[in-house]
């Protein structure tokens, strides 16, 4: 597969023009850490945008960051941390998720995180990438350079084009510049650990905690059997983790209130909390078996226990984040069709399931992303054509395309 | 003044026939045909533009909306959706050759789901009534546009409305989880839901703020948040505007995101104080209201920090609210600023642009210079925390040319906003009012890409025509792909 290397927006435009002329699709490659995510596609030309990198402006007074998409998450996190700021959506990187599947040493980038719309544990409180992407510059499938959104937080000037790019997996445009909203980094973080005996009780507890005014910024549930993999001490059958962030007096006050209310058996301090929530975002508790297939379910949070009850035979390898709104499920490598039919039947109309990690032949045959109802699928296809009528960009990555 | 496209006389001539067709789709009582009754819908809150709609239809169900849209699609009849008609940008300005689709009868709260912290409501429900309906659960709906008593959630979705508290809690787009949408083909589809994110493109993200151009929303799932146990406000006066702006910057730089951070200039302070007697200092050039919310330990800590920053930057007045009544009083003047300015002049234009915060003093100086150039007075209120300006340009519509000068003044302010790296609209939308300014912010290619999105939803451009885009939609032309035949356009492009 020949690979175009683009280090400037103009070179991206040239590569798309060339691909259009040759009628050959382009596979967009950034840091290469999520090559295994999405439908497996027939190889076209590669478009390597890893050199389209670098922070353009960190405007700390205005709480914005303008960057090239190939910039690594590590570089961005370090630059922001030096000014005590951060990306509120806590991009998880997923460093280890695909590492075992033959991918070279790969670097998660901000562009990849936006294209895949990946958010970490703070999703329930602060939203996802779509809630923090203020503006984009991009090249569409007609090789036209366009801009959408802007550099200010409040902006209702035309359609919110940046949001459409989040989760589009590059099928609408190649991103060439991103402006993101920043937030101050909290000075203090604390995590309360609470033991429970059933998943239903754990989910109810997370909902109750999230409904208190104590501003819980993350709520996860780990089965005792895998808790140790995230460095969490074992107690009971399930451990509920509640995170508090903010100024020190505030966190101390709120933690004391929640400890009383939920009988927490332990409390993690700032460095311990950061490590645990990083591991939860990185899916670390389920990465012990490199051959297991990984599902990511986003159900209505309160329905998580009954969805999992319908899947008990499949796996004991499971954990919950987002107060039950995110279920990670590992199924053994030998499971026929990765149990796709059972999993999608269990979630029904109450959310969606993504087959995040599976061998390529399976990801070519099965819908990786939840199939859409026909009118919605037709509308998605028209939007795809509105940006990329020849299906040049990442053809087939989301749905089968001719 | 931006004008709507010329009415299509063929459609206007078919008024009676279209009404007869609609009676086969929805009960007769839901259709308004009488000229005198149609006049009640002749404008929204952008009152300078008036014209009675072709017909008014007031559907009650998604199925009725679907039947109406399917009919419009099949017969090429344009339509304008309308919530409470509070749009300041002419988002719901009617047209003589378009149906007006009034969503007022969609006024039910369908479900309150405390466990998942969300509520399912119909689009005609008012913004404030959502928070009122869930207050007993210790929850609230965060976006709070100043028209929240009257404006509907459907209109909020259309315009991506903000409000005083969006600095901390986000805009409508950050607080809507899902919608039921009727497409122009009459399909009823669901975008989003009680779950996080959705497969496929983020159509919900594109829909919020799309000003009624992409479809008609018939149900909305909104995110609810726990009500903070305590909110306190600081009332801070400064002898210089620059000091107030520097304080805003210092608060943000200290890592504090207040629940709200509002600024008023001297004319706005004087007008508000004369109107509501909130106890505002009259000897200052700028007034800040900074609200902090959360647990008592946090709020008290932050109140002290902010007060310290204000004093260090030259504040001559700094009062912290000691009770809910006092906090409400601090806000009373700000919330009444528009009607207060309305007492100073027969008419005013409320502008809505956004700039990076650091340009606030420069912008105020420029507006002040423009006052003499245009011969009109301005009072300024800002959502200072997020750089959202609301200059109120005072004029008298009975004096010939004053409205034209006011509109030219407003356009000049918005062009300045864009030049400073900001946006034409922070929360009111482009609508009809700012439509012709769009090319100042976007290139033709940018606008073509936006119009192609429109074409994917509404290829005949029947939904809310004449709004947002300065040129009519040309879907057939925009859909063509000019392929590059023959030799490679860039043979020297590195590929290896």
Image (cartoon, coloured by chain):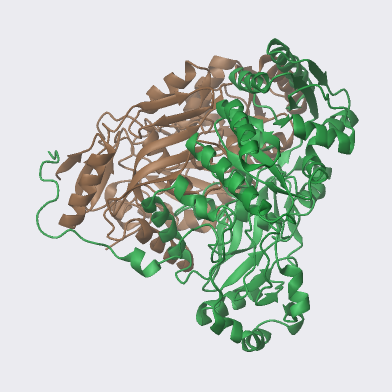
Say left or right for B484 vs A136: left
Q: Compared to B254, does B131 lie above or below?
A: below
**Picture quadrant of residue B359:** top right
Query: What's the residue at 56%, 33% (across, down)?
Result: A122
Query: What's the residue at 71%, 17% (across, down)?
Result: B306
Give the colour chain B carries in the figure.
Answer: green
Q: Which of A41 and B221 is in front in this view?
A: B221
Q: In which quarter of the image is the C terminus of chain A?
A: bottom left
Q: Judging from the image, what is the letter of the chain drawn in brown? A: A
**Picture quadrant of residue B23:** bottom right
Q: Nearer the viewer, residue A216 or A315?
A: A216
Q: Compared to A5, does B85 lie above or below?
A: below
Q: Quadrant of the N terminus of chain A?
A: top left
- Give residue B493's position: percent from left, percent from top: 14, 41
**Picture quadrant of residue B239:** top right
- Give residue A267's position: percent from left, percent from top: 64, 18
Q: Nearer the viewer, residue A256 or A179?
A: A179
Say left or right for A270 vs B449: right
Q: Compared to A233, does B85 lie above or below?
A: below
Say left or right for A365 vs B341: left
Question: Is residue A231 among the parts visible in the rendering?
Answer: no
- Give residue B281's position: percent from left, percent from top: 83, 24
């Amino acid at each position: 597969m020949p690979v175009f290397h683009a280090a400037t927006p103009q070179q991206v435009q040239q590569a798309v023009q060339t691909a259009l002329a040759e009628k050959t699709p382009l596979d967009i490659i950034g840091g290469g850490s999520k090559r295994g995510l999405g439908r497996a596609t027939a190889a076209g030309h590669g478009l390597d945008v890893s050199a389209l990198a670098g922070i353009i402006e960190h405007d700390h007074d205005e709480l914005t960051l303008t960057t090239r998409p190939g910039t690594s998450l590590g570089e961005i996190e370090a630059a922001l941390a030096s000014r005590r700021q951060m990306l509120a959506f806590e991009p998880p990187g997923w460093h280890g998720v695909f590492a075992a599947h033959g991918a070279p040493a790969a670097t998660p980038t901000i562009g990849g995180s936006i294209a895949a719309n990946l958010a970490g544990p703070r999703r329930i409180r602060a939203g996802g990438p779509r809630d923090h992407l203020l503006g984009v510059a991009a090249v569409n499938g007609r090789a036209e350079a366009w801009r959408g959104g802007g550099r200010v937080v409040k902006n209702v000037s035309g359609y919110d084009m940046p949001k459409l790019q989040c989760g589009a997996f590059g099928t609408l445009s190649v991103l060439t510049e991103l402006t993101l909203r920043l937030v101050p980094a909290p000075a203090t973080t604390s995590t309360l650990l609470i033991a429970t005996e059933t998943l239903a009780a754990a989910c109810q507890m997370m909902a109750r905690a999230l409904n208190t005014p104590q501003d819980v910024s993350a709520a996860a549930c780990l089965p005792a059997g895998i808790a140790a993999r995230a460095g969490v001490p074992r107690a009971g059958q399930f451990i509920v983790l509640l995170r508090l962030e903010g100024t020190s007096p505030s966190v101390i006050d709120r933690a004391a209130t929640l400890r009383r209310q939920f009988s927490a058996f332990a409390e993690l301090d700032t460095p311990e909390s950061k490590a645990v929530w990083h591991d939860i975002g990185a899916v670390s508790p389920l990465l012990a078996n490199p051959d297991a297939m990984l599902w990511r379910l986003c159900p209505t949070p309160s329905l998580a226990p009954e969805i999992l009850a319908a899947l008990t035979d499949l796996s004991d390898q499971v954990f919950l984040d987002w107060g039950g709104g995110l279920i990670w499920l590992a199924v053994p490598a030998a499971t026929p069709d990765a149990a796709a039919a059972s999993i999608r039947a269990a979630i029904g109309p109450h959310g969606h399931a993504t087959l995040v990690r599976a061998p390529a032949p399976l990801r070519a045959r099965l819908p990786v992303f939840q199939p859409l109802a026909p009118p919605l699928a037709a509308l998605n296809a028209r939007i795809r054509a509105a940006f990329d009528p020849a299906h040049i960009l990442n053809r087939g990555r989301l749905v089968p395309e001719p | 003044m931006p004008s709507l496209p010329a009415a299509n006389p063929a459609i206007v001539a078919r008024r009676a026939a279209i009404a007869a067709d609609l009676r086969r789709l929805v009960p007769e009582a839901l259709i308004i045909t009488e000229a005198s009754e149609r006049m009640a819908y002749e404008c929204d809150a952008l009152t300078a533009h008036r014209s009675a709609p072709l017909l008014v239809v007031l559907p009650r169900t998604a199925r009725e909306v679907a039947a109406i849209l399917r009919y419009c699609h099949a017969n090429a009849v344009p339509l304008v959706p309308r919530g409470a008609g509070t749009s300041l940008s002419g988002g719901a300005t009617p047209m003589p050759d378009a149906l007006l689709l009034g969503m007022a009868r969609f006024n039910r709260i369908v479900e309150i789901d405390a466990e998942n912290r969300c509520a399912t409501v119909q689009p005609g429900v008012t913004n404030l009534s959502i928070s009122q309906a869930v207050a007993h659960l210790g929850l609230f709906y965060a976006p709070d546009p100043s028209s929240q008593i009257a404006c509907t959630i459907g209109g909020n979705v259309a315009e991506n409305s903000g409000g005083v508290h969006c600095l901390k809690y986000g805009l409508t787009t950050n607080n809507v989880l899902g919608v039921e949408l009727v497409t122009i083909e009459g399909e009823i589809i669901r975008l989003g839901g009680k779950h996080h994110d959705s497969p496929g493109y983020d159509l919900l993200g594109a829909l919020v703020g799309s000003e009624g151009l992409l479809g008609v929303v018939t149900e909305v799932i909104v995110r609810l948040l726990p009500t903070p146990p305590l909110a306190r406000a600081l009332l801070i006066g400064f002898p210089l505007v620059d000091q107030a702006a520097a304080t805003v910057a210092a608060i943000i730089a200290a890592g504090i995101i207040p629940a709200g951070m509002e600024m008023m200039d001297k004319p706005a302070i004087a007008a508000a104080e004369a109107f509501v007697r909130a106890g505002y200092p009259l000897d200052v050039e700028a007034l800040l209201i900074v609200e902090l919310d959360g647990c008592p330990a946090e709020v008290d800590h932050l109140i002290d920090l902010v007060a310290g920053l204000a004093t260090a930057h030259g504040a001559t007045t700094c009062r912290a609210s000691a009770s809910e009544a006092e906090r409400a009083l601090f806000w009373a003047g700000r919330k009444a600023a528009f009607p207060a300015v309305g007492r100073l002049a027969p008419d005013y234009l409320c502008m809505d642009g956004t700039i990076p915060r650091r340009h606030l003093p420069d912008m105020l100086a420029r507006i002040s210079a423009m006052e003499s150039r245009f011969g009109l007075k301005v009072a300024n209120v800002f959502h200072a925390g997020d750089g959202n300006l609301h200059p109120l340009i005072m004029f008298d519509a009975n004096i010939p040319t004053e409205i034209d000068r006011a509109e030219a003044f407003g356009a000049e302010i918005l062009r300045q906003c864009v030049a400073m790296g900001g946006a034409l609209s922070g929360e009111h939308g482009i609508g009809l009012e700012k439509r012709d300014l769009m090319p100042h912010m976007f290139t033709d290619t940018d606008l073509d890409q936006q119009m192609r999105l429109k074409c994917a939803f509404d290829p005949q451009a029947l939904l809310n025509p004449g709004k947002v885009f300065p040129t009519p939609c040309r879907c057939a032309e925009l859909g063509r792909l000019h392929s590059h035949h023959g030799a490679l356009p860039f043979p020297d492009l590195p590929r290896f």
